[in-house]
Image (cartoon, rainbow, N blue to C red):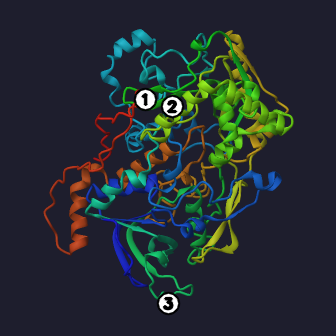
Amino acid sequence: MIADTAAWDNGRVLSTEFCVVGAGPAGITLALTLAERGCQVLLLESGQRPLDPQAQALYAGEVDGGPLGAQAHSPPDRFRMRGLGGSSIRWGGRCMPMDPIDFEPRPWVAWSGWPIGPQDLAPYWAPAGDWAEAGSGSGIGAIAALDTMEQTTGWTPRDANAGPDAYDARRALPGAPPLIAGFDSTRVHTHGLERFSCPTDFGLRYRRRLAQAPTLQVLQGATCTDLRLSADGRRVQSLRVCLSPSHGSGSGAGDPRGQRCIEVRARQVLLAAGGLETARLLLDSDEAQPGGVGNAHDLVGRFYMCHLAANLGELQLTGGPERVRHGYEISPEGVYCRRRLAIAPEAQREHRLLNAVARLHLPPIADPRHGSGALSALYLARPFISHEYGRRLGDEVALGLGARALRWGGHAKNLVTDAPATAAFLGHWLLRRTLATRKFPSVILPNRRNRFSLELQAEQVPHPDSRVTLSDTRDALGQRRLQVGWRHQAQDVASVAHSLAIMAAEIARHGVGTLRWSADRLPADLLRYGAYGGHHLGTARMGRDPRSSVVDPQCRVHGVDNLHIASSAVFPTSGQANPTLTILALALRLADHLVPPESQTQAKTQAHTLATGTPAQPTQRPHRDDSAHTAQDPSSTQGARDTRPQPAVSP
C-alpha cells in the first residue's frame, strides 16, 4: 500500500516489524522480498514522484577537494535522486558482479579483504540480475549441453577465477566471435561481460507491486532525520521521520521548524539510503552516542571510495573492422551485453595491481579529424547530454586541439560530408534508444579505421583519510549537511599506469595492434574530473572487528542489535565493477538472513498477529506478478513488443 499522509497529524506513532529507510533499488528489493514473505514492512522514501525540488535540495552539501579543488568530486546532489526508485530514476543500467579477487585480503592493498567471499554472494547474482532486468542467464543451460560447450569452447565453466556464467562470454554467448580476432591472452582477459538493465526505474517498474502488497506500507515525502537509541545503546528504539509539507499543511506543533514529524518503532531497522546518505544519518544521530550511531571507533564516513574513470590513449588495431566486436552483443534472453579488456587476477597478484577494466571506446570526439558526422553531432550536442558524460565529450585541453572556430568548422564539414551515416545513426538512436523500453545502452558506431580510445574504469584503494563528514550548515529539516572529502592515493594512478603497460605489451605480443598512451599525462587524464560521479562506496565498511569496520558480515551495525545497512556503504573495497548488482545481491542476502525463505509461514503469522492483535492460520499466498513488462526486442528495429516471459523476482 502506498499511503496518503496528507491528513496525518504531527506526533503520530507507527509500529512495524521492519522499517526500510530509502526506496532505491536496494530498499525496494528488500521491502518487497520481506513483504512477499508475509512480513509487516514500512518503506520510507524522502522524495516523491514526480520529483520534488525541495526534497532534492536536501542532498545539497559541500565538497572539500583538497589539492584537486572543487573538481575532485561532483556536488553531493548531482547524481542522487530523491523519489520512489532512488538513483535508478537516472542510471545507465550497467550490471556486473564483483570479481573473486575483490573479496581477497591483498597484501599490496591496505585495508582490503571482505569478511564474506564470492561463495556467499553466488546464490544471489542471478536473482539480482532479474530484479534489475539485466537477465540472470538462468536459461543458458538449454542452449547447449555442458559437454558440447566444453568441446566447442575448450572451457570448463567452473574455473576457479571465473565469475557467474551469465557474465562470462564463453558461456553466456556461445559461438560469438572474439572481441579482437587473434587476441587470446592469459594476462588480459576479454571474456568478461557487462549486462545492461533496460535501464529499470525501480519506482515505476515495481510501483504496482508496492501498492498491492498487503503487508507493506510505503510513505513518500517521509525523511528519516534521527535514529533514537535505547538507554543502553543496543537498539534503535525509534526513528524520527519528517513529512513533506506538500503532503499536507499540519500545524507542526511541537517541532521548532514547523515540520510535521512522526515516530516509527520497528523491530528491525534497515538503512538503504546509499553510500553518502547512510553515513550522514548515522553521524547526525548523535544524541545517545557522541559521534553518531555505530561510530565508536570514528569509522563512519571514512574509507570513502568511488572509481577512477577516463577516456584515454589511442588503440590502433590491425586488419579490417570485421576483426573487432567493439559493440553490444545480445544474450539469449534479449539483454544487451558488452565485453571489455580486464587484467587477469594472476597478473594482478604478480604485479600487485588494483583491479581495472577498459572498454573499446569511440575515437576522441572533440577532434573533427575522425570524419564522422555522428560523432560531430554528439560533440555539438554536448549541452543537452548528461553532465557525467557530456563533459568528457569535449576535452580539448587533453587533446591539445586548436582554436574553437576551426574545430567547429571541421565538425560542420563532417555533418555535411557524412550526412547519410549521420541520418542512419539518428534513426537508430530514435528507435533503439529514445522510443525503446529496453534501451540501446550507449553510442556505438561502425569503426572503419579500427582506431579507438579506451574507456577506463579502475579500483581505488580504500584509505581512512578519504571521508565524508558533517558540515556546520543545516538543511530545511535541521540535519547537518554533508561535506565530501574524497581523496585519491598515488597507488591508484600507478596501478592504472602498470595496467595500461600490460595491455599494451599483450596487444603488441599478439600482433593485433598498438596501444599508445601518455604516462606524463596520465595523472591529469585520470583526475581531471575527479571521482566517478555516481558510485559512492565504503562509508560504513563491512568487517568482523568493530575496531576496523562499521557493520558485521551480516551487515548489522556493530553494537546495535536491530540496525542493518543495505547499501554500497558497506563495501570494504570497490573493485572495478559498477556497484548496483552487488548492492542488490547484498540486499537479497540480508533478506534471507532476517527471514529465511523456509520461515515464511511463521513470518506471516507474526505479521498478522502484530497487525490485528489476534493469531491467524497462515495460508500460502501465491506470487502475483502484476507488473507485466513489455520491452522492445533488441534484435529488432521495428519496436516489437517483447512477449518473452519476464523474470520471476520474488519467492
Q: Earlier in the sequence, mark 1 or mark 3?
A: 3
Pointers 1 and 2 in contact (C-beta within 8 Å): yes
Q: Is residue 83 left or right of residue 53?
A: left
Residue 434 vs 137, above or below: the answer is below
Mark 2 nearby-residue class (10 Å; few <14, some 14–19, many ≥20): some
Q: CA distance from mark 2 to mark 3?
A: 58 Å
| Residue 542 visible somewhere in the drawing | no
Dot 3 falls on a residue whose secondary structure is loop
Which of the 4 image quarters holds residue 447? top right
Residue 149 vs 96, above or below: the answer is above
The residue tagged 2 is 428
Dividing the image into 4 quarters, which one contains the N terminus?
A: bottom left
Q: CA distance from mark 1 to mark 3?
A: 59 Å
| Residue 279 visible somewhere in the drawing | yes
The residue tagged 3 is 254
At 65% from the left and 59% from the top, the residue drawn is 76
Dot 1 falls on a residue whose secondary structure is loop
Q: Is residue 617 left or right of residue 517?
A: left
**Residue 208, position as x, y percentages in the image:** 31, 56
